Image: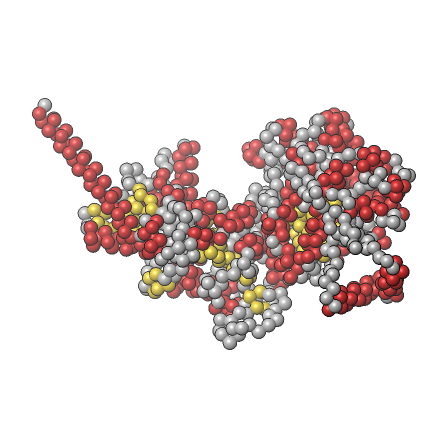
Amino acid sequence: MTQRDKFGAALLPETQDPGELQEWRDALDSILESWGPQQGRERAVVVLDALLAHARQRKLMWRPEPVTAYLNTVAVEEQPSYPGELDIERRLSAILRWNALAMVVRANLANGELGGHIASYASAADLFEVGFQHFFRARSATDGGDLVYFQPHSAPGIYARAFLEGRLSEDSLCHYRQELSAEKKGTQGLTSYPHPYLMPDFWQFPTGSMGIGPINAIYQARFMRYLSDRGLLETSGRKVWGFFGDGEMDEPESIAALTLAAREKLDNCVFVINCNLQRLDGPVRGNGRIVDELESLFSGAGWNVVKCLWGSEWDELLARDHDHAIARAFSQTVDGEFQTLSANDGAFNRRTFFSRTPELQALVAHLTDDGIDKLRRGGHDPVKIHAAFAQAVKQTGRPTVVLAKTMKGYGMGTVGQGRMTTHQQKKLDRDDLIAFRERFQLPLTDEQVEQAAFYKPEEESVEMRYLHAKREALGGYLPQRLLVAPALSVPSLESTAGFALQANGKVMSTTMAFVRQLGALLKDPVLGPRIVPIVADEARTFGMANLFRQVGIYAPFGQLYQPEDSASILSYKEEKSGQILEEGITEAGALSSWTAAATSYSTHGLSMLPFYIYYSMFGFQRVGDLIWAAADQRARGFLIGATSGRTTLGGEGLQHQDGTSHLSASTIPNCRAYDPSFAGELAVIIDHGSRKMVEEQVDEFYYVTVTNENVENPDLPLSARDGVLRGMYLHRPGSSLPQRVQLFGSGAIMGEVLKAADILAKEHGIAADVWSVTSYIEIAREGAARERQWREGSRASVDSWFEQELEKSSGPIIAATDYVRALPEMVRAFVPPGRRYVTLGTDGFGRSDSRAALRAHFQVDAQAIVQASLRACDELVKAEEARRTARLAEIISLSVI
């Protein structure tokens, strides 16, 4: 019977005939030795595959274990020569570790509530440094360079390096996590994590929200292939590096796109997982082994897995370990035990780990306790890291993940290394700082240590010349973000959307109007190739099937089959140069694609204009964190929320009906959100947004909701365009009647508002002015800005544009929306004084029924609008009568006197 370890992995099999087993081993060795290292391996793999296939034909359902031995993937004899000066790099790494630590310690001495992280960079420093010294290529005039997604908790280390490079001042380091204080002093403060919005010329990618970095990195690598396959930009040779924590891989987004990367053979994508075995509160897998789990996960998804677990000091022990005692001991050690070992010294490790068997004791008998303490993990040995990275970059046909084993809080001594509390460690006392100095042999006096003083060698020192030379050889410094790209011209609005501006009553939905305008934009010779249409899996739902033939669906290997509908003019067409990104049922993936395209101007120096269309409910509510990160990255593009509103998807029910997305959009400062009612309004918004983003290169993006209900579309007069963009315009004035009411309509509910206006005039003798409110958010923002100026004393009164427009009118105001009432309530503060303002919305959970039934249920139909108008008008009449009565009583009282 096969023996297995505590994790279920097979140990060396027992056999009744060791000679037979040796014959098979000898046969395999013969193949390897006869044909040389490379060809021998290739032939051996063919033989093993053939044997496995034959075994399955004989119904022997055996398969190889997904986990290999807990050892380094790259054998000692296969390690390339190290291309750097290890002693100089050790000194540089020590300086960077100190400055990163000092940055956090100083900040918390100044203000204990600022926080910061020391332990993560302490574990990852060598991983980053090997990359910076030998792999990460910067952008040059001829090459876009590599893109690096940095582990967010390691940000202090990246700042420390930029300080040595002369890209950040010491004053900036003194203002880590003190951005507002720095701004007052005219200094660049340093953000807690990578935030391009706050440091626009430094950080490229926001990774602070766990899980977003991995999925964005994969879709970024894919987008680079897309650009190359479409002939827009040469991206071969460039890599996307993603540095992530082992605990971070628990986030669903972290693993959501692993199979995409393998399926599309993204060998330009390299993940480096910092396996320090600890999350924020304790071990990642205390009762298991996260390295094994990640190896199984990534290899199962089709990735090349490179394990970098043990430092060079282990090579001599492993070479003498002919009985595999160390490998067996590793196989029986869980991560909780490894953490305990890392938190203690060599004597403890000798007693606890190496005393398990006589063989282990004999292997380390010649080592002192200090020697055992210096047995490094692979993620702290530049030689082993370089070997792993070198194998990763030469891999073809598959993405690669490097699983690097480290210690959290490495070098922080008894206060931090491997401790459960290490993630929260913000402060170190004098003795801890002195111990850190001694551990890394830093040239600091006791006084400098006590002050947590930053250290920077002289510019002509060996260390500084080496640091600059290495970066110059790799093209320059990074991270560094490009602020602008060559602008694009946008075709005239009349040429792309004349049908919408002069609609003349044509019946269509705003979704159909959008698709028609998009099709026209795609035909433009300048802007068209830069447009990126993106759908999750709803192109036919949104009437976009005609674009399949027009621009094709991107598929890196072309179309390898004849589609079922090939005879149709709307047939499914996949091709290598296809323009549409049809992502499948993954809103997170589609949004990550959109982010890559929407930030191409900064990452690739190439302006693109992505349009991602989706069920509006499955945007902000489902992947809102990804949208927030895109905003941080200063994205430029369109998010099109289709089938918008809570009453438009009658039969779909609660989870499909959107009544809140505009509220979410309102929280993002650089998101401009609109809910147009008609094709002409939509056309003006699309045209305006395109010009702002790719002509003027303004860092903003647009969320526009469109409906699936066919309505009569009126012409849009030129005079209304400014109001469309500012958030409101008078769509249809009421007739001349004694009483008036102002009706606000938006998106899907505008039809009900128009019906209500007709009923009020014909049946109740009340004139209704109908306003099309395209954006409560734009109105509220303008009002809030003026209100702030008023508070600060720079304006005599708020006097918002919204208020000015309404002061030209009279009567109560009734606002009806297919969104929750909180949306129209956003502008209440700016309604002219004394005017009744009634809001109708779709608060609560959705239902399944007809549009008419749903609108009646939520009281946003024409009848509800009429009822609200009558109540408000009646209140006004009664108030006027009361005033007259009071005035008459006053007159009578005066006459009696």
Taking depth in this image into account, of 425 and 70 the one nearest to the observer is 70
Visible in this render: residue 496?
A: no
Which residue is the extreme one toward the bottom?
Answer: 567
The image position of residue 174, as x and y in percent, is 64, 33
The image position of residue 487, as x and y in percent, is 54, 56
How many numbered markers are drawn?
Answer: 0
Taking depth in this image into account, of 269 and 190 the one nearest to the observer is 269
Taking depth in this image into account, of 857 and 42 the one nearest to the observer is 857
Q: Residue at x 79, y 31 (%)?
A: 438
Q: Residue at x 49, y 52 (%)?
A: 619
Taking depth in this image into account, of 72 and 269 the one nearest to the observer is 72
Q: Horizontally, is 459 left or right of 745 in the view?
A: right
Q: Quadrant of residue 606?
A: bottom right
The image position of residue 684, as x and y in percent, is 41, 57
Say which quadrant the C terminus sits in.
Answer: top left
Q: Horizontally, is 612 left or right of 176 in the view?
A: left
The image position of residue 674, as x and y in percent, is 42, 51
Vertical relation: 673 (above or below) 459: below
Vertical relation: 242 (above or below) 125: below
Which residue is the extreme one toward the top?
Answer: 897
Q: Residue at x 89, y 50 (%)?
A: 322
Q: Quadrant of residue 574?
A: bottom right
Vertical relation: 553 (above or below) 371: below
Visible in this render: residue 307?
A: yes
Say which quadrant the N terminus sits in.
Answer: bottom right
Q: Residue at x 75, y 40 (%)?
A: 338
Task: Specify how the rendered protein is coloured.
Answer: secondary structure
